[in-house]
Amino acid sequence: SKSELEAFDGRVEFCLVGAGPKTVYQTPLSRCNVKLDDGTLCNYPLQKRHEIIKNKQGKDVQLIDFHGPRSVTHVQWRCTGRECRTLYHYNYRVEGGKRVACVDLDQVDALFVSNVQGYDLKYLQYHDSLQFRGFVSVHALEYALEDTFESDDYKERARHLYHDARFL
């Protein structure tokens, strides 16, 4: 803030305050958009269910972007309609145990492939451009990702999750 910087007589090159809170990803929708069995739209309001910070194995929710994997918070919402009760995540909803895209790409800036793994949208677009316009193979992209981000957790899931994100 300005008062903090004034305490340094304006000679500050940078001011490091701390890591700050994690980025929170939650659906941009406020109402359920599921078609019910009778053909009508549910349209009940969504209610916050809980924040997902770690998966069942204790690993952080991750978003992969140009800086590598980073920990984020992913918020799960639920439809309040009794006959519906659909679960909503950032860019998809769960229907019958399957993930169904429920938002347009211009409404989000990341794509989550599960409740604990997401990809920055610009990151995916960049890699698609490399592959399809630069004629770079999928294996070359995977090698670069694994070589750059040395996290063992990321390496073991990289190929599977990246392909899931590309086909959302």
Image (spheres, helix red, strand yellow):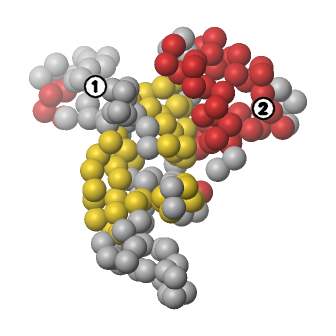
**Disc 1 secondary structure class:** loop
Is residue 129 placed above or below 28 in the rendered structure?
A: above
The amino acid marked with disc number 2 is: Leu
Crowding around mark 2 (Cα neighbors within 10 Å: few <14, some 14 to 19, many 20+) is some
Point 64% across, 41% down: residue: 164
Point 48% across, 74% down: residue: 33
Is residue 137 placed above or below 74 in the rendered structure?
A: above
The image quadrant of residue 113 is top right
Q: Please say if the residues under marks 1 and 2 sit with CB atoms less than 8 Å apart.
A: no
Point 52% across, 82% down: residue: 37
Q: Position of residue 82 (x, y in %)?
A: 32, 76
**Disc 2 secondary structure class:** helix
Point 62% across, 42% down: residue: 165
Q: CA distance from mark 1 to mark 2?
A: 32 Å
- Foreground pick, 61 / 125: 61
In the figure, is residue 38 to the left or right of 15? right
The numbered disc on residue 61 is none
Q: Dividing the image into 4 quarters, which one contains the N terminus?
A: top left
- Say which label, 1 or 2, has the lower sequence index: 1
The numbered disc on residue 130 is 2
The numbered disc on residue 19 is 1
